[in-house]
Image (cartoon, rainbow, N blue to C red):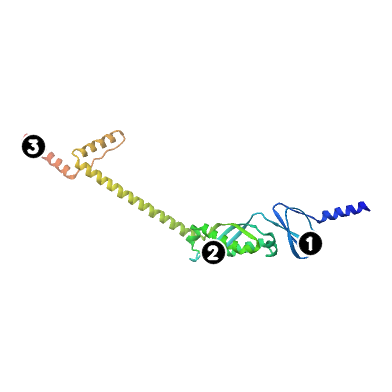
C-alpha cells in the first residue's frame, strides 16, 4: 500500500506540474480570480481549482494586410505595413483584452487608414517615416492599457492606380527635362562669356589671332583623314575675281 500511495503521489505531482519557458510568463487564475504570475521553471497547478495561461514575451511581427485608403487630395491607393510589438505586462494582456493579437492587428489597420487618409499623396511618398512614427505613437498609447508595447511600425508598400503611376512618371520625366534644359542653358551662358573674353584678348594682342590660326592648322594637320574647309568672306572672293578679270584683259591687249 505504501508503494501504491507513493506512486499515486508521484503521478499527481507530474500531472500538476506545468513548465514555463524562459521567454514566457504564466498567468494563474485560482477559482476564476487572478492570483499571480509564474516565472520560468516548473510550477504546480491544481486542476479544477487553478488554470494557467502562458503568455509569450518575445517581440512579434504582425503583417497588416493591404488597406484601401483615399488621401487628403482624393487619390485612391492601397497600403500595407508591419508592426513589431511585445507583451510588457502578461497579466493585462490576458485580463484586459480578449485576444490581444487580433486587437492589435485591427487597431493597426484603422489607425493606418486614418493617418494615411489625412495626408496628401506627396507627403505619403516623401515622408513615410514620419507617418510611421505617428502610427506607432497612436497604437502604443492605445495598447498601453492592454500591457502591449509597440516597438516599431514600418509602412511597406504603397500601391497607386496605373493611370496615377503614369501621371507621376510623366511629371518626373518633365521635371528631369526641365533641369536638363536649365543646366544646358547655364553651360551655354558660361561658354559664351568665356568665348567673348577670349575674342577680346585676341583682338587686343597684335598677331595673336594669326598665331591662333596657325596653331589650329597645326592641330588639324596631325590627322590626314581630316578635311579642312575654310570660310572665305565674299568680299575677298569678289576681289580675287576682279584681279583675275583685269589680268585676262591685260593679256588680251598685249596679244593685240
In screen coordinates, is 244 left or right of 231? left
Q: Residue shown at 62%/59% (left/top)? A: 149
Mark drawn on residue 250 = 3
The answer to which image quadrant residue 210 occupies is top left
User: Image height check: is 215 above or below 8?
Assistant: above
User: Image height check: is 155 above or below 216?
Assistant: below
- Nearer the observer: mark 3 or 2; the answer is 2
Q: CA distance from mark 3 to mark 2?
A: 99 Å
- Nearer the observer: mark 1 or 3; the answer is 1
Q: Residue shown at 18%/45% (left/top)? A: 234
Q: Earlier in the sequence, mark 3 or mark 2?
A: 2
Q: Percent position (x, y) of residue 123?
A: 48, 60
Q: Percent position (x, y) of residue 193?
A: 27, 48
Q: 12 or 166, which lies in front?
A: 12
The answer to which image quadrant residue 246 occupies is top left
Q: Residues within 10 Å of mark 1 (few under 14, many from 20)?
A: some
Q: Name the residue that disc number 2 marks.
A: 115
Q: Earlier in the sequence, mark 2 or mark 1?
A: 1
Q: Name the residue that disc number 1 marks.
A: 50
Q: Earlier in the sequence, mark 1 or mark 3?
A: 1
Amino acid at each position: 500500500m505504501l508503494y501504491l500511495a507513493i506512486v499515486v503521489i508521484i503521478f499527481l505531482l507530474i500531472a500538476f506540474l506545468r513548465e514555463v519557458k524562459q521567454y514566457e510568463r504564466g498567468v494563474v487564475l485560482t477559482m476564476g480570480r487572478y492570483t499571480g504570475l509564474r516565472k520560468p521553471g516548473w510550477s504546480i497547478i491544481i486542476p479544477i481549482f487553478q488554470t494557467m495561461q502562458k503568455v509569450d514575451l518575445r517581440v512579434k511581427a504582425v503583417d497588416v494586410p493591404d488597406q484601401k485608403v483615399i488621401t487628403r487630395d482624393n487619390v485612391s491607393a492601397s497600403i500595407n505595413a508591419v508592426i513589431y510589438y511585445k507583451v510588457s505586462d502578461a497579466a493585462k494582456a490576458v485580463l484586459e483584452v480578449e485576444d490581444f493579437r487580433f486587437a492589435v492587428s485591427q487597431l493597426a489597420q484603422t489607425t493606418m487608414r486614418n493617418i494615411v487618409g489625412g495626408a496628401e499623396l506627396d507627403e505619403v511618398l516623401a515622408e513615410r517615416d514620419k507617418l510611421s512614427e505617428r502610427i506607432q505613437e497612436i497604437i502604443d498609447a492605445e495598447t498601453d492599457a492592454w500591457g502591449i508595447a509597440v516597438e516599431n511600425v514600418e509602412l511597406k508598400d504603397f500601391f497607386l492606380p496605373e493611370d496615377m503611376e503614369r501621371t507621376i512618371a510623366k511629371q518626373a520625366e518633365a521635371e528631369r527635362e526641365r533641369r536638363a534644359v536649365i543646366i544646358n542653358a547655364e553651360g551655354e551662358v558660361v561658354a559664351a562669356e568665356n568665348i567673348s573674353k577670349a575674342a577680346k584678348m585676341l583682338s587686343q594682342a597684335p598677331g595673336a589671332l594669326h598665331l591662333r590660326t596657325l596653331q589650329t592648322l597645326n592641330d588639324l594637320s596631325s590627322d590626314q583623314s581630316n578635311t579642312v574647309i575654310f570660310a572665305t568672306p565674299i568680299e575677298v572672293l569678289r576681289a580675287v575675281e576682279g584681279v583675275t578679270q583685269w589680268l585676262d584683259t591685260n593679256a588680251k591687249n598685249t596679244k593685240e
